[in-house]
Image (spheres, grey):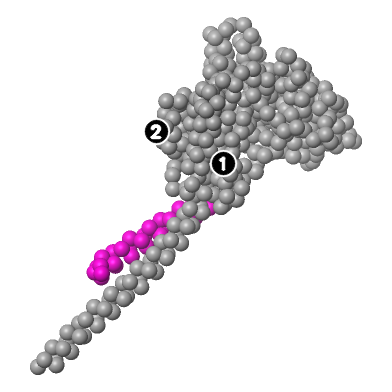
Amino acid sequence: MAQKMQFDLVSPERRLASLSVEAVQIPAADGDMTAMADHAPLITTLRPGVLKVEGAEGGAETAYFVTGGFADVAGPTVTVLAEQALPVSEVTADIIDGLIAEARAAHDKAVAADGAQGADVSAKFLADMEAARAHVIG
Amino acid sequence: MPNLKDLKNRIASVKSTRKITKAMQMVAAAKLRRAQDAAEAARPYAEKMETVMGGLAQSVGGSDNAPRLLAGTGKSDVHLLVVMTAERGLCGGFNSTIVRKARQHVETLLAAGKTVKILTVGKKGREQLKRDHGGKFVGHVDLSDVKRLGYADAARIAADVLGRFDAGDFDVATIFFNRFQSVISQVPTATQIIPAQFDAPETASDTGSLYDYEPSEEAVLEDLLPRGVATQIFTALLENAASEQGARMSAMDNATRNAGDMIERLTIEYNRSRQAVITNELIEIISGAEAL
């Protein structure tokens, strides 16, 4: 049996989860990564995507939809600070479509503003968001 | 001496005032609980944010290509003051203390020859500052239709502020709000949010350099700083909301007590004049009988 570690998921408004888990799959900026106990200390930014928790008490696998933020992995603890986070079961197509519309508006604005640098970032954000939608809603 | 009818009306009116202030006090108490819970719930995020950013700022801050949100524009000529007040009055000195603090700050800045711009959040502060500093207003955020403060509100304000910063509208931004201490004490506070400032991190938790950063230290910091601004604004909004309810609660408590005192005084006066009237009537009857 894998070693347990402390996992906290915090949004600006409240603490969403505080569990003892075996592994956390994090949608990091450069690709998904899984952190287990005694992972090397790491801070990474998040892209919009699904965060999966494995081996929580009760055995259930829980998944959260996050839009951004960062994760602090430090040996026995993993803390994820998400700008917006929802359990995947509560995410509806409407919510996610709203977020995509926002992202698209931001992208259009960035393209109109300078075209190059800002647009790259927002385009990635938009693409990630759409990928996340496909993942969550199916 | 006012006549009996007037006194009676007066007592009735003060009594209904007392009912209203009592109700307001109880509503404020309930809202305060909620606001305090919200502030409490937001604390872990803000604290974590601060430690991570503090560590990062220390390792990146010294370099030449530090983000502008951290290093500033290199000048401090134009100051933006974000003055956060309530949307409603009847909360004691809550709004005035913030406005007074902001006003002092404006005066020191003006005396030092700086340019001042003001962004108001909440109607009451705008009204109070309008007369002296109306020309310095650059915007207003209306929160009157917000029932429950959410991070989205803070993000909106932050986006506004950051947009102005990117456009080069100001060099330094400071937020003014009331920090909640207890129901009877709220401390008007000014916090500089741009360029970001961090308390010197304690040496014990100086683990910043042990971390791996993905994609890179600079990129993480670049991503975090705007979030940090939003978080600080969110914290300030929550503190302010709790302070407002606390201030209203104690103001309404005082008002209720005053009304009670007033009712007592008026009742004594009413009884006295009632007795005087009775005595007068008796004297009239007796002297009438004697005259016969």
Q: In this view, does A44 lie to the left or right of B157?
A: right
A45 vs B75, nearest the viewer? B75
Residue interval drawn in magenta: B1-29
Which quadrant is home to the C terminus of chain A? top right
Q: Is residue B258 visible?
A: yes
Q: Mark 2 lies on which chain?
A: B
User: Of marks 1 and 2, which one's residue comes earlier in the chain?
Assistant: 2
The answer to whether residue B255 is above or below residue B226 is: below
Residue B11: image quadrant is: bottom left
Residue placed at 31% from the left, 76% from the top? B272
Residue A22 placement (x, y as % from top left): 83, 34
**Chain containing the residue with disc 1:** B
Q: Residue lying furthest right in this view? A: A1
Q: Could you say which quadrant of the image residue B161 lies in?
A: top right
Residue ID for mark 2: B131
Quadrant holding the N terminus of chain A: top right
Three-letter code, disc 2: Arg
Q: Within 10 angstroms of label 2, few (less than 14), some, or many (20 or more) residues?
A: few
Front position in the image: B124 or A63: B124
The image quarter in which residue B226 lies: top right
Q: Name the residue under label 1.
A: B188
The residues bearing labels 1 and 2 have C-alpha atoms spaced at a distance of 21 Å
Q: What residue type is labelled 1?
A: Pro
Residue B181 colored magenta?
no
Q: Residue at x 46, y 28 (%)?
A: B140
In the rendered structure, are the residues bearing label 1 and label 2 in contact, judged by CB atoms less than 8 Å apart? no
